[in-house]
Amino acid sequence: MNNNTTAITNKGKGRFLRGLDILTYGLTAFLALGCEGILAFGIEQKIYNCTIKDFNTWQSILHWVLTYIIWGLFAFYICRSMKKKGYELFPVNDRKIRTWQWVCIGLGVAVCLISTWIDWNGSKVLTELDRKGPLLFVFQYIYYFIEVFLVMLIIVCGQKACETWFGRENIPYGGIIAALTWGLGHWWSKGSFTAGIFTALCGLMLGSVYLLANRKAKLTYLLLCIIFIL
C-alpha cells in the first residue's frame, strides 16, 4: 500500500478511530520517555549495583547515550509512521503571531524562568555546570534537547487527537495530555508529589505556548527549550 492510498484510508476512518490513532503516537512518545526509567531502575541499577544518583561519570554518560538511541528510534518511528499515514505532524504555517500572543508567550516564559530560578536558588544552567562539570553538563543538555522534542510530540499528537474528537482549536488539549502523562510521570520518577504537580503545570504551559505560537514547529521547539531547560 503506497502513501497516498494509506492517507486516503486514514481519512476514511471514523472520527473516533482517527483521533485514537493520532493519540496513540503521543502515548508512544510518552512510552519512549518511560523507557529511561526501565533502563535506569530495571537494568543499569542491577548491573552497577547502585542507583542512578550514584553513577560515576562514565556510567552516567553511557546511560545518556543509550537513552539518546532509544528516544531517537522512537521519535524517528513516530514521525515516519505518521507521515506514511498522511498525518501532517508539523504543517507549514505562515500565520502571523499577534501582539497579544507574544505578550502571553513572554509572560508565560517569564513565570517559568522565575519559578525555575526560585526552585534552583539561582541559575539552573550555571548550577548544573558547577555540580557536574563541563563533560557531564554537555551530555545532560543533549539529553534535555531530545526530551523536549518528545514532549513536543506528546503535545502535538494530543492536540490533534482531541481536536479530531471535540473540535475547539483554542483549547490546549496537548498541554493537558502532556500534564497527565509526562507531568504526573515525574511524580513516580522523582518520588515527589510536588515535583509531579509542578511538572504537570509546566506541561500545561508548554501546550498553551504551542497554540500561542500558532503551532509553528521551530518556534515552539525553541520556546519549549527555553522554558524547560533554562
Image: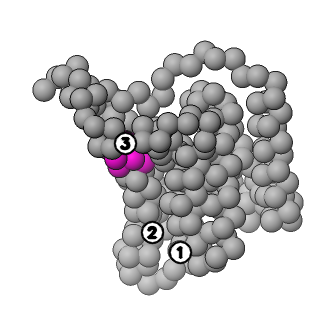
Q: What's under tag 1, amino acid-wise?
A: Trp
Looking at this rendering, what residue extends furthest in the bottom direction?
49
Quarter of the figure that contains the N terminus = top left
Mark 1, residue position: 188
Q: Is residue 182 left or right of residue 79?
A: right
Residue 8: x %, y % from top left:
23, 23
83 or 139: nearer the viewer:
83
Task: Determine if residue 157 is in view.
Answer: no
Packing grade of label 1 (10 A; few <14, some 14-19, many >=20) is few
Residue 114: x %, y % from top left:
85, 54
Residue 187: x %, y % from top left:
58, 72
Q: What's under tag 2, amino acid-wise?
A: Gly
Looking at the rendered structure, which numbered label has been put on residue 60? none
> Do the residues bearing badges 2 and 3 touch, measured as CB atoms within 8 Å?
no
Q: Is residue 124 left or right of residue 87?
A: right
Image point 78% across, 44% down: which residue? Answer: 109
Helix, strand or loop at label 3? It is helix
Image point 51% across, 80% down: which residue? Answer: 51
The CA distance from mark 1 to mark 3 is 28 Å
Q: Is residue 33 left or right of residue 25?
A: right
Asked if 106 appears above or below 58 in the picture, the reply is above
> Do the residues bearing badges 2 and 1 touch, measured as CB atoms within 8 Å?
yes
Report the magenta residues as a range.
Answer: 19-26
In which quarter of the view is residue 3 placed?
Answer: top left
The CA distance from mark 2 to mark 3 is 28 Å
Mark 2, residue position: 37
Looking at the rendered structure, which numbered label has been put on residue 19? 3
Q: Indicate the colouring scheme.
A: one colour
Asked if 5 appears above or below 221 in the picture, the reply is above
Helix, strand or loop at label 2? It is helix
